[in-house]
Amino acid sequence: MSERRTRRQAAMEAAAAADENPAKPGADAHGDANGNSAAHTSATSNTHANPAENIFLFWPNLIGYFRIVLAIASLYYMPLHPRTCSLLYSISCLLDALDGYAARYFNQSTRFGAVLDMVTDRCTTSCLLVFLSSAFPRWAIVFQGLISLDFASHYIHMYATLAMGGSAESHKNVDKSRSWLLNLYYTNKLGRSIRHMRLERALLHCPSTLLSFSSPLLSPQLLQTVGESKAAAIQGGAQVNSSIIRQLFTNPYSAAALEMARANKMDSTWPWILAGISAPVMVLKNILNIVQLVKASKWLAEGDVQARKTAALAKAKTG
């Protein structure tokens, strides 16, 4: 009884207090009754305190845009200016490590940035391999296979991650039980360094481009000559590969033709050294692409089997 009387007294006191403090004229009675006025005020203040962020202007994404500009410039110079092309392409690859550092430093890791980074890598790699296919026609099937493997591996891996792991799952979170090699590649410091700096592309594809201009072993057309009558019309300092220059340029003394001649005089020693050092890294990277393709395919197949079992059980219950 005492407890019931206490509750009644508390209710009566609360009613009396409400009568003594009526709502002020002009106040939002609906808002006060539901407690929405305070919430609206709080939400408004939070909106002013935290304005909408422009993801496209985050520092890592700005670095990504600059990488695209450098990649396009390197592709522009690729047919005739191998040194300039290799320099721009290498800087674009090395900046891939900087945008990841900027994302962690400024706390600006975004899905858009991750996709931008991957698309840039796939496009620049494929464009470079297309050029190498034209520079080394006899090895075109190899470069075409590398392009196909690169696209297929990453596409299936991304799709499997989204389909099986959910939209919040990162494609870099590979469990050891699924593949210890991929887990090592995506989580180990050395693996991250190779992945971020794109060493296999900067140190192998670029030397391959340089070798297409400097190595007669890989490019026998560099040894082609012309007859004495045609060679006499060409300036003495630009006689290297005069037949190719004649075929590509109307004026053999143009800036592009002279650059072609200068590039063909380039020593192939350092490109061969760089290619030899980075070749094992390139082989390992493509082995990882194969493993990634196989593991992602098996993961999707496991999901299909489970989905079919679930559908069969549901059909049996309804039947």
Image (cartoon, rainbow, N blue to C red):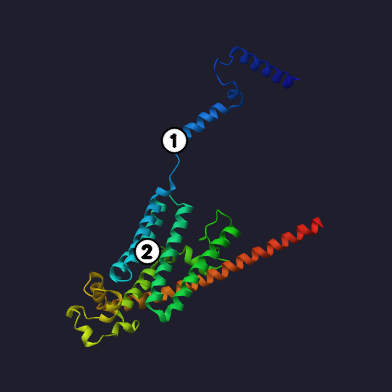
User: Left or right: 274 with respect to 168?
Assistant: left
- SS at badge 1: helix
Quadrant for residue 285, please give it: bottom left
The label on residue 49 is 1
Q: Is residue 241 visible?
A: no
Which residue is at the front of the view, 229 or 240?
A: 229
User: Left or right: 22 with respect to 214?
Assistant: right
Residue type of the residue flagged with mark 2:
Cys
Residue under the image location 38 percent in, 64 percent down: 197
Position in image of residue 180 (x %, y %): 53, 68
- SS at badge 2: helix
Residue under the image location 29 percent in, 85 percent down: 223
Position in image of residue 131 (x %, y %): 38, 72
Quadrant for residue 218, please give it: bottom left
Position in image of residue 189 (x %, y %): 43, 64
Residue type of the residue flagged with mark 1:
Ala
Position in image of residue 111 (x %, y %): 48, 53
Q: Is residue 30 visible?
A: yes
Which residue is at the front of the view, 50 or 5?
A: 50
Residue under the image location 53 percent in, 71 percent down: 291
Residue under the image location 52 percent in, 60 percent down: 171
Q: CA distance from mark 1 to mark 2?
A: 38 Å
Q: Nearer the viewer, mark 1 or mark 2?
A: 2
**Mark 1 or 2, nearer chain start:** 1
Looking at the rendering, in which quadrant would you find the C terminus? bottom right
- Depicted 130 relative to depicted 222: above or below: above
Query: Hey, which residue is sitting farthest left in the picture?
Result: 236
Which residue is at the front of the view, 218 or 178?
A: 218
The label on residue 93 is 2
Q: Residues within 10 Å of mark 2 (few under 14, many from 20)?
A: many
User: Left or right: 92 with respect to 170?
Assistant: left
- Depicted 52 relative to depicted 190: above or below: above
